Image: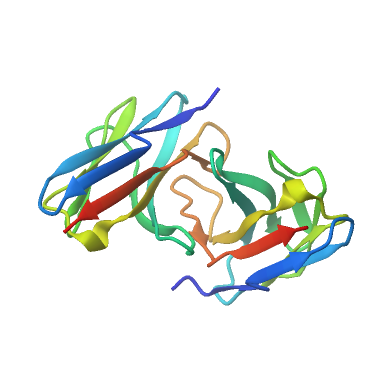
Amino acid sequence: EDQVTQSPEALRLQEGESSSLNCSYTVSGLRGLFWYRQDPGKGPEFLFTLYSAGEEKEKERLKATLTKKESFLHITAPKPEDSATYLCAVQAGGSYIPTFGRGTSLIVHP
Amino acid sequence: DAGITQSPRHKVTETGTPVTLRCHQTENHRYMYWYRQDPGHGLRLIHYSYGVKDTDKGEVSDGYSVSRSKTEDFLLTLESATSSQTSVYFCAISESGSSGNTIYFGEGSWLTVV
């Protein structure tokens, strides 16, 4: 059973159309939640780490938020260059190794 | 740029042959990882290392072995390649084993087993 679930699997937006990606987790003892961006043919690129409920982090058009059961990656006024797969990973319990979700593929049309 | 170099970047090999993928880092990080990424499965951990000559298995370690004789190099060997091992392989590194242990990825090695 997946401990980290990302939704939707795929999302198509028009340029400027804001939206959110979801990462829900069922682990206990959260130690860190990570967001990555992955472009086709490339390795995942680190975006954010969140540690506790209520925490928020921003980078350009992206803002990540965290609750006790899920995280959202908000994309404000996206541009075509924001098109990528966004991965969420959770570090929990006694392990320092994150568990990854399957990702959300985002396409932003001009 | 996380200072990680994977080689080869692309390889086609025949079933039954051994294959070695190399990961080289310039960050002097203690922890190194090998993942594979497949459609429908996401990133799955194969093996990891927490120091020179210290390695452990991940969730999909069958058919793979690793070695780490120097801090900067982590080798992944497919002992006898099978078609199910066709995948893209990512090496990753991290500095610590504590909370917020951010993992940084290389650019990937695409392996096709025919």
The quadrant in which the N terminus of chain B is found is: bottom left
* Residue nearest the observer in this picture, A20 or B13: B13
Locate residue B65: give its quadrant.
bottom right
Q: Is residue B27 above or below residue A46?
A: below
The percent position of residue A54, horizontal first and vertical second, equals 22, 34
Residue depicted at x 46% and y 28%: A29
Residue depicted at x 25% and y 58%: A82
A82 vs B108, left or right, is left
Residue depicted at x 44% and y 60%: A40
Locate residue B110: give its quadrant.
bottom right
The percent position of residue B87, horizontal first and vertical second, equals 65, 53
Asked if residue B23 shows in the view, the reply is: no
Q: Is residue B70 above or below residue A45?
A: below
The quadrant in which the C terminus of chain B is found is: bottom right
Asked if residue B88 shows in the view, the reply is: yes
Q: Is residue B68 above or below residue A98?
A: below
The percent position of residue A76, horizontal first and vertical second, equals 13, 49
A56 vs A92, left or right, is left
The percent position of residue B8, horizontal first and vertical second, equals 68, 73
Residue depicted at x 22% and y 60%: A80
